[in-house]
Amino acid sequence: MGVAEQYKNLRDEIDQVCIACGRAPQDVVLVAVSKTVGIAEVNLALEAGAKDFGENRSDELVKKHQACPSAQWHFIGNIQSRRIADIVPCAHLIHSVYKAEHLPKIQEAAQRAGKVQNILLEVNSGEEQKDGIQPDMAFDFAEAASRLNNVRLCGLMTMAPQGDLNEARRCFKALRLLRDEMASAGVVDSSVFRELSMGMTEDWRQAVEEGATLIRVGRAVFSSEFA
Ligand SMILES: *Cc1c(COP(=O)(O)O)cnc(C)c1O
């Protein structure tokens, strides 16, 4: 089975899980994480109907964005300050922002590029994970973001600890509750603060059931291990 078939089978399965839990399939965007493959595989997925792709390194994001400008490129990796100026012109959505000190740099790069940069706030879901903000700091971050005209905070992102699907579900549910709490506290624009980026190859089913609007799946699309 090739990339095209793997992508289509996965998208069908996502649609089935959505329907089984009473959600509309179009409310869950599949971000195909192409960090381990090249442009040829991205093109196979594009031809199979994929539109959204995720990268975790700025150099790969820039390269693939240039090669495949019709795709929507998502940045999902660790953000290095000095790479923000490279990431912003290429990224439809940056999922992995959690340092308030990066916000002015994103603002500056977005202004220069003549765009409003969509971002998500990455939330730390456990001790073994080093990245992400602590949930109680999310409100201050949202307030800082709301003061920047070229930055739009669209929701939250997390990575669950791997290996325990019940624990993953607990993290996903906590992320949904935090989103809803922030929206009702009025610290965010609730008409745009809707996204939950959560779920990967191992745990996307649990994430969809708990309300994910974006799932970031790499191996199930691109690795022959999942063919
Ligand atoms: C690699 C990666 C993914 C995809 O992981 P798979 O297990 O291959 O689906 C999702 N999110 C982030 C942040 C990643 O780095």
Image (tube, rainbow, N blue to C red):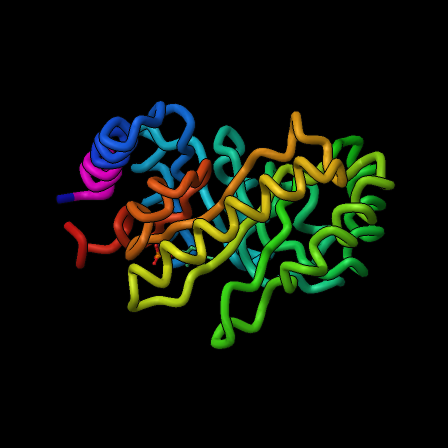
Across and down, in percent, residue 105 comes to 81, 53
Q: Is residue 5 magenta?
A: yes
| Residue at image coords 72%, 60% | 137
Nearest the viewer among 163 and 74 is: 163
Assign the N terminus to one quadrant of the image.
Answer: top left
| Residue at image coords 75%, 33% | 116
Question: Is residue 220 rendered to the left or right of residue 121?
Answer: left
Residue positioned most to the bottom:
128
Across and down, in percent, residue 187 comes to 76, 40
Q: Quadrant of residue 215?
A: top left
Q: Quadrant of residue 205?
A: top left
Q: Quadrant of ligand 1?
A: bottom left
| Residue at image coords 83%, 49% | 144
Q: Is residue 13 magenta?
A: no
Q: Which residues are magenta?
A: 2-11
Question: Is residue 56 rendered to the left or right of residue 225?
Answer: right
Main SS, magenta region, reads helix
Let me know if residue 192 appears in the view.
Answer: yes
Question: Is residue 191 rendered to the left or right of residue 115?
Answer: left
Across and down, in percent, residue 207 comes to 37, 46
Nearest the viewer among 159 and 211 is: 211
| Residue at image coords 72%, 40% | 185
Let me know if residue 117 appears in the view.
Answer: no
Question: Is residue 86 rendered to the left or right of residue 15?
Answer: right
Across and down, in percent, residue 156 comes to 58, 47
Picture mark count: 0
